[in-house]
């Protein structure tokens, strides 16, 4: 089958890159002819201009290199939903992929592209692990919401990444999708990207929201574990932490895969900590986006490794108990099988 995937494929976020790669790799290995619809989000980095320019140039080069080497072919570049409607890819099936593709606060003026509001009516439409990223629908536009519902009703099958997303979809659009895993889980290993992973006696911190609590209390984790800590994604060196300017995909994966301990507030930071069977904790930011992390950790039986703040670690030692990956793998194996079967059956 000829399939066009639409997702956040062109991103400086390594998690977004990996969910795209994971889905496309699985589809290709199932024998499908896959392409990616080349429509891109505008990423505004909230950093000083000189850092933003340097970061942009480095990230742009990395993205282009990774896409050229590892992604299936891209369609021509689309710049708007109207552009996509006027000349849609001619394929058998459109798949809207994972990440927060159904969060209009992120997709902005391109939001209808991710609800597949384009193309021939007879082209099969389905979602794989699409995420709203939030518990409640906050798009206060009744006519737009009704239009989205009409788009979703054209899908052959629907799946979302989180239980909260399934509940939101039922409440808001009166449709009940099934819940599947992030596409990164569809493949057991990514040796072709990581090579041999060397374990290092260090704490890897992959924090998207670098809070005051983190910087004030990460030293406690270092002292408790007797390990140095590296901050994976930072523009400037920070006192008491090893410096690592935002790494590319392969280095990022190797860092997580080789860590003695991981501290993260990132969904995909948690995903790959689980895949690499690392000891880790997830810090919550207590905002609307926490639901995806909570859903993931609960589905794997890892609630004890969710914390509100690092300071809370001083008052409980649950986080020090080794993760029982035998139990985690049993849960993951079932969820992976269900997710793969959903996608295979949806494409028959």
Image (cartoon, rainbow, N blue to C red):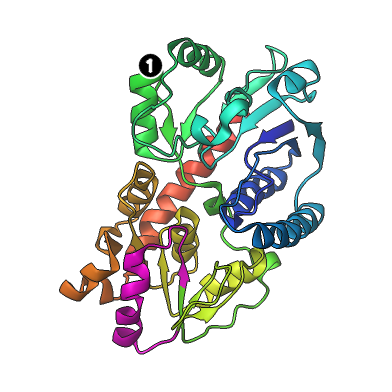
Which residue in the structure is indicated by mark 1? 174
**Picture coordinates of residue 79, whole percent (x, y):** 75, 29
The magenta stretch is 205-228
Image-based side of 311 in relation to 269, left or right: left
Compared to 205, does 342 lie above or below? above
Query: Residue 201 colored magenta?
Result: no
Q: Kindly give the residue lying farthest to the left in the view shown.
A: 315
* Residue sitting at x 67%, y 65%: 248
Q: Secondary structure at mark 1?
A: loop
Query: Residue 218 colored magenta?
Result: yes
Residue 179 appears anywhere in the view: yes
Residue 103 appears anywhere in the view: no
Judge by depth and name the residue closer to the eye, 161 or 87: 87
Judge by depth and name the residue closer to the eye, 237 or 174: 237
**Picture coordinates of residue 137, whole percent (x, y):** 38, 27
Figure quadrant of residue 197? bottom right
* Residue sitting at x 57%, y 33%: 107
**Picture coordinates of residue 317, whole percent (x, y):** 20, 75
* Residue sitting at x 38%, y 51%: 293
Q: Kindly give the residue lying farthest to the front in the view shown.
A: 49
Judge by depth and name the residue closer to the eye, 229 or 256: 229
Task: For label 1, count other residues whose C-alpha is less than 10 Å away and answer few (under 14), some (14-19) or many (20+).
Answer: few
Judge by depth and name the residue closer to the eye, 180 or 280: 280
């Amino acid at each position: 089958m000829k399939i066009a995937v639409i997702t956040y494929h062109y991103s400086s976020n390594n998690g977004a890159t990996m969910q795209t790669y994971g889905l496309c790799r699985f589809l290709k290995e199932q024998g499908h002819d896959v392409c990616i619809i080349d429509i891109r989000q505008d990423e505004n980095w909230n950093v000083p201009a000189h850092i933003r320019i340097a970061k942009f140039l480095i990230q742009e080069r990395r993205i282009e290199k990774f896409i050229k080497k590892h992604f299936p072919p891209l369609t021509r570049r689309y710049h708007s939903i109207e552009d996509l409607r006027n000349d849609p890819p001619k394929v058998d099936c459109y798949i809207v992929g994972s990440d927060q593709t159904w969060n209009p606060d992120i997709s902005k003026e391109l939001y209808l592209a991710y609800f597949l509001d384009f193309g021939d009516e007879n082209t099969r439409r389905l979602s794989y692990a699409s995420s709203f990223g939030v518990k409640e629908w906050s798009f206060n536009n009744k006519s737009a919401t009704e239009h989205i519902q009409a788009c979703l009703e054209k899908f052959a099958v629907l799946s979302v990444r989180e239980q909260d997303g399934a509940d939101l979809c039922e409440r808001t659009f009166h449709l009940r999708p099934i819940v599947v895993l992030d596409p990164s889980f569809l493949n057991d290993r990514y040796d072709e990207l990581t090579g041999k992973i060397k374990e290092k006696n260090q704490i890897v911190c992959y924090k998207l929201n670098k809070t005051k609590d983190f910087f004030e209390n990460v030293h406690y984790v270092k002292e408790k574990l007797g390990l140095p800590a590296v901050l994976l994604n930072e523009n400037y060196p920070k006192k008491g932490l090893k410096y690592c300017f935002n790494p590319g995909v392969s280095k990022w994966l190797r860092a997580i895969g080789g860590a003695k301990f991981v501290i993260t507030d990132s969904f995909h930071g948690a995903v790959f900590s689980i895949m690499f069977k690392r000891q880790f904790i997830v810090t919550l930011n207590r905002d609307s986006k926490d639901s995806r992390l909570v859903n993931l950790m609960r589905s794997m039986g890892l609630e004890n490794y969710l914390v509100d703040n690092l300071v809370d670690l001083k008052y409980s030692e649950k986080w020090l108990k080794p993760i029982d990956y035998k139990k985690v793998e049993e849960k993951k194996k079932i969820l992976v099988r269900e997710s793969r079967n959903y996608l295979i059956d949806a494409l028959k």
